[in-house]
Each structure stands twice: as structure tokens, then as C-alpha cells.
Amino acid sequence: MNRRYRKTIIAGNWKMNKTLSETRAFAEEIKAVIGKPKWCEVVLCVPFVNIPAAVRMFKECRIAIGAENCHYESAGAYTGEVTAEMLKEVGVKYVIIGHSERRQYYNETDSTVNKKVHAAIEAGLYPIVCVGESLEQRELGVTMELITYQVKAALSGVSADKMRHVVIAYEPIWAIGTGKTATAEQAAEVCEAIRAVIRKLYGARVARAVTIQYGGSMNAKNAAELLAQPDIDGGLIGGASLKVPDFMQIIESANQE
Ligand code: PGA
């Protein structure tokens, strides 16, 4: 983390988990313990149907609400899809774009990721853009090339002043939901490389200000070490964001003075 230059963001990604009543129970439980996170912003990305209720439930404890996806068009015949503007209007602040599960199961490509990033910014949302290599790509030694490509493709056509709205999440696919975390060194190396790509594209000031999260089996035990890396400005957390005590410990790791 480097709080002098950029925001630390701890974001839960609930994926396809928690009904409305389970969401309410989580909100009640966390309200009792969270206090005022001083040094980081806390976000929960929840399934579409629970968003309006979640916005209300989590307002009091200052947890911002995110969506897990959006469409890139502003309206039209796209059965089952949701626009960025619809999300904005119900109080969403962040939207995860290009999560590896979307890339893997729903044909998300670098090109649709790019279009969605533009749509999100246009609607006034903050996209959390996910990039990350597979185990095969890591073993082939092409991680840096791949990440560079993914970052450049996702940000194609995004102007420097719009970069204030963009968050990048480095999520090695082999670490997602597997319990296998990247070591702090591995995560730090790639997050540093991502910042270098942004520096090349937009210059030092923009690069210094962009929040880069790590995601992939971040948990109560490993969060402090990961967040201590200068280029890791938060986490995108799946499994460990579903239980209040685990999620709280991660928030507290980011909240150390
Ligand atoms: P995980 O998921 O923390 O369960 O590995 C992270 C993510 O997919 O964002």
C-alpha cells in the first residue's frame, strides 16, 4: 500500500453467493463490528438482484456496493443483461470487469472487457478491471507479456483523466478459489509491472495514483503480508469475504496505521 498517493480498496466479490436474507444477516453482523474504516475503502460486489437492498443495508456502515459485471451497450435486445447506467442509478459505485470466471465461462474477451470499461466509466462507475495468468502461462514464462497485453487491451482508448476512475485487480487464475495464494513476492512483482505499464501509457502521475489490488485466495492470514507490498493497494476477495470475521481481519490489515 502507499496511502500517500492512492486509495486502498478492500473489495469482496461474492460471486453467485448469498440470498437476500443472508445478505441482511451479513450486514447486521458487520455493522456491529466495523466501526469507521479510516485508511481504506470497503466494497462488497454482490449479485444483481440484491444490489438495491444492499445499497441501503450497507450505507450506514459506509460499505460501498459493487456489481460483478455489466453489459457494454447502453440499452437494447440483450436478454438477461444489465447496463452500467442501470447499476449507477440504483447506487452502485464499482463494477468488476473481466473477472477470469467471466472470461472462462461467458466468453468475455479483451475486446468486450475494453468496451465494458468504457461503458462503466461513461456511466460514472468505477471499473475494477481483472487481469491474470493461468498456471500454464506462468509455467511457460509469459506472465508479464500476457498481463501487459491484458492491461493495454482493457484500457485501450481510455484517456489519462478517466484513469482516476479505474482500479486494476491482479488475479492469477491459479490462485482463485484454490487456497493457493501467490507469494507476496510474486504478487508484488506483477503489481509493480502493471504500474510500469500504466506509467508508460499515461505517465508517472497517473501510475502513482492508480489503485492495484491483488486477488486470489487472499485471507485473514496472508492479507497483511500482501498489503505490505508497496504496489499492492488492496484486495479483491472471494471466499474470505463471505464470513464477517475473515473479511474484518482483512479490513483491519488494511487499516493499520
Ligand atoms: P478467492 O476469489 O478469494 O475465493 O480466491 C477471488 C476472486 O475471484 O476475486
Image (cartoon, grey):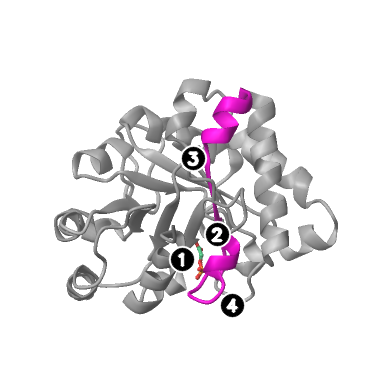
- As measured in the structure, the alpha-carbon distance from the residue carrying label 4 to the one carrying label 1 is 19 Å
Side (left or right) of 145 relative to 131: right
In this figure, which residue is indicated by the disc labeled 1?
253
Q: Amino acid at mark 2?
A: Leu
Q: Earlier in the sequence, mark 3 or mark 2?
A: 3
- As measured in the structure, the alpha-carbon distance from the residue carrying label 1 to the one carrying label 3 is 17 Å
Residue closest to the eye, 240 or 33: 33
In this figure, which residue is indicated by the disc labeled 4?
179
Q: Amino acid at mark 3?
A: Arg
In this figure, which residue is indicated by the disc labeled 3?
4
Label 4 vs label 1, nearer the camera: 1
The answer to whether the beta carbon of the residue marked 4 is less than 8 Å from any atom of ligand 1 is: yes
- Residue 243 visible in the picture: yes
Q: Is residue 43 magenta?
A: no
Label 4 vs label 3, nearer the camera: 3
Name the residue furthest right.
140
- As measured in the structure, the alpha-carbon distance from the residue carrying label 4 to the one carrying label 3 is 31 Å
- As measured in the structure, the alpha-carbon distance from the residue carrying label 2 to the one carrying label 1 is 7 Å
**Percent of width and height locating residue 87:** 26, 43
Range shown magenta: 202-227
Image disc number at residue 227: 2
Q: Determine the image quadrant of residue 246.
A: bottom left
The residue shown at (71%, 40%) is: 148
Q: Earlier in the sequence, mark 2 or mark 1?
A: 2
Side (left or right) of 143 relative to 52: right
Q: Earlier in the sequence, mark 2 or mark 4?
A: 4
Side (left or right) of 103 relative to 255: right
